[in-house]
Image: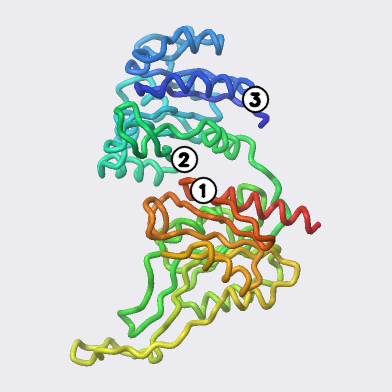
């Protein structure tokens, strides 16, 4: 990773994991980045500011009432040349401050004044991390574009074992690299991504669908665009905003999704089918709302089009990636899907597992390839999963070319 000339503000808060920020700082400076540290008062109870000042040769930003920049307003001046603000570790208290827009210490003032990307790496006890208030605060921050590096699961300072450990520094560095030194390995490629659920109408009001939020497919579209691809996103109904640079086609039913995919298939170099297409639809769709007394106790169903199988039959020289959402026999079922539908990769996940599956911001997946390879990934954010998938796709494209 080469970050020469990049200026990073490193926020350190009052967590036992604050000592890991010293190593993170060392790794960042080794890339050529210029790093200045912002500490909360709580952080100074764990690591002395002098440690960071010695390594950065710059004053630590701590006292919001001092004019740290030769009589210029500190939190404004600090953000003027910043390329990135990273808060690692981020405590529950700091996360709440940022989510609520408080400005009662140097770090929270810098966050509000920043116009650069922001990365948060939470670290706290597992019960605190799982608390609904904390999760709601993280959701608010994500909705504002903050990049959250999910914590790891393991032994905690409290003696408990659970999710709350600061993410591995390599994971934090990976997010920083993605934001400041994005790969261009998909430049000139057309990546066709499907995302979200489909809705199969029973009448003008009711429909059959599933729990897919579209988050995984949208993360893939965003990541592919960041790596230089022209992205075509075929999306079922979701509440998500598509990447600004993506060519987005909104559909509702499986039949509409199939038509949209086939219309763009000819120009696609890569197809990643992350959509959760309904497997069945009502045989008959009423043209008016059915009254309670009209609704049958049984609704006759018929299969929807198998979009992935259709793509596999017309694959040509394309890279095709499918998803397999399972609740049992994960690898065996995913392998059957890969072989049956002529896929290059299949991304399998146990949707019954914690932190995985539908309508969450994380995923736990296993990637299988056509050469019988298996790669098991740990709990990661869906954006990190997206980049790991695209790493494999880029490698396959390179080998083909």
Residue position marked by numbered label 3 in the rendering: 31
Nearer to us: label 2 or label 1: 1
Does residue 64 show up?
no
* Dot 2: element: strand
- Packing grade of label 3 (10 A; few <14, some 14-19, many >=20) is some
Q: Which is nearer the eye, 221 or 370?
A: 370
Q: Are marks 2 and 1 in contact (CB under 8 Å)?
A: yes
Residue 383: assigned label: 1
| Residue located farthest toward the left when viewing the structure as drawn | 293
As displayed, is residue 10 above or below residue 48?
A: below
Mark before the other along the chain sequence, 2 or 1: 2
Q: Residue at x 45, y 56 (%)?
A: 215
As displayed, is residue 288 above or below residue 32?
A: below
Q: Residue at x 37, y 65 (%)?
A: 211
For marks 2 and 1, give the CA distance: 9 Å
The quadrant of the rendering that contains the N terminus is: top right
Residue position marked by numbered label 2 in the rendering: 147
Q: Residue at x 23, y 92 (%)?
A: 294
Q: Is residue 332 left or right of residue 238?
A: right
* Dot 3: element: loop
Nearer to us: label 3 or label 2: 3
* Dot 1: element: helix
Image coloring type: rainbow
Q: State which quadrant residue 8 falls in.
A: top right
For marks 3 and 2, give the CA distance: 21 Å
Rendered location of residue 146, percent (x, y): 44, 40
């Amino acid at each position: 990773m080469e970050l020469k000339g990049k200026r990073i503000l490193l926020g350190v808060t009052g967590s036992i994991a604050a000592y890991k920020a010293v190593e993170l700082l060392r790794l960042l400076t080794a890339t050529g980045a210029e790093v200045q540290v912002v500490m909360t008062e709580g952080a100074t109870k764990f690591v002395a500011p002098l440690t960071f000042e010695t390594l950065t040769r710059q004053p630590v930003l701590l006292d919001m009432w001092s004019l740290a920049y030769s009589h210029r307003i500190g939190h404004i001046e600090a953000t003027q040349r910043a390329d990135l603000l990273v808060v690692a570790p981020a405590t529950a208290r700091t996360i709440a401050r940022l989510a609520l827009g408080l400005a009662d210490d140097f770090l929270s003032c810098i966050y509000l004044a920043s116009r650069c990307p922001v990365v948060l790496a939470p670290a706290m006890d597992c019960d605190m991390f799982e608390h609904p208030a904390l999760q709601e605060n993280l959701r608010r921050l994500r909705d504002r574009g903050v990049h959250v590096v999910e914590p790891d699961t393991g032994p905690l300072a409290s003696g408990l074992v659970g999710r709350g450990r600061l993410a591995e520094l390599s994971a934090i560095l990976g997010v920083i690299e993605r934001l400041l030194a994005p790969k261009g390995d998909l430049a000139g490629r057309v990546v066709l991504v499907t995302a979200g659920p489909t809705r199969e109408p029973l009448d003008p009001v009711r429909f059959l669908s599933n729990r897919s939020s579209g988050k995984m497919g949208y993360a893939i579209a965003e990541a592919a665009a960041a790596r230089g691809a022209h992205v075509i996103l075929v999306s079922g109904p979701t509440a998500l905003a598509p990447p600004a640079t993506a060519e987005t086609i909104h559909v509702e039913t499986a039949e509409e999704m199939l038509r949209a995919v086939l219309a763009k298939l000819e120009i696609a170099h890569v197809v990643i089918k992350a959509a959760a297409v309904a497997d069945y639809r009502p045989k008959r769709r009423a043209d008016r709302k059915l009254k309670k007394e009209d609704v049958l106790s049984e609704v006759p169903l018929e299969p929807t089009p198998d979009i992935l199988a259709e793509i596999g039959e017309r694959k040509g020289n394309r890279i095709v990636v499918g998803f397999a959402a399972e609740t049992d026999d994960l690898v065996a079922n995913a392998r059957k899907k890969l072989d049956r539908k002529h896929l290059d990769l299949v991304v399998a996940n146990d949707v019954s597992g914690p932190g995985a599956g539908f309508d969450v911001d994380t995923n736990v997946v296993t990637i299988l390839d056509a050469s019988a390879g298996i790669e098991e990934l740990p709990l990661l954010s869906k954006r990190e999963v997206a980049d790991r998938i695209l790493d494999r796709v880029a490698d396959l494209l390179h080998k083909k070319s």
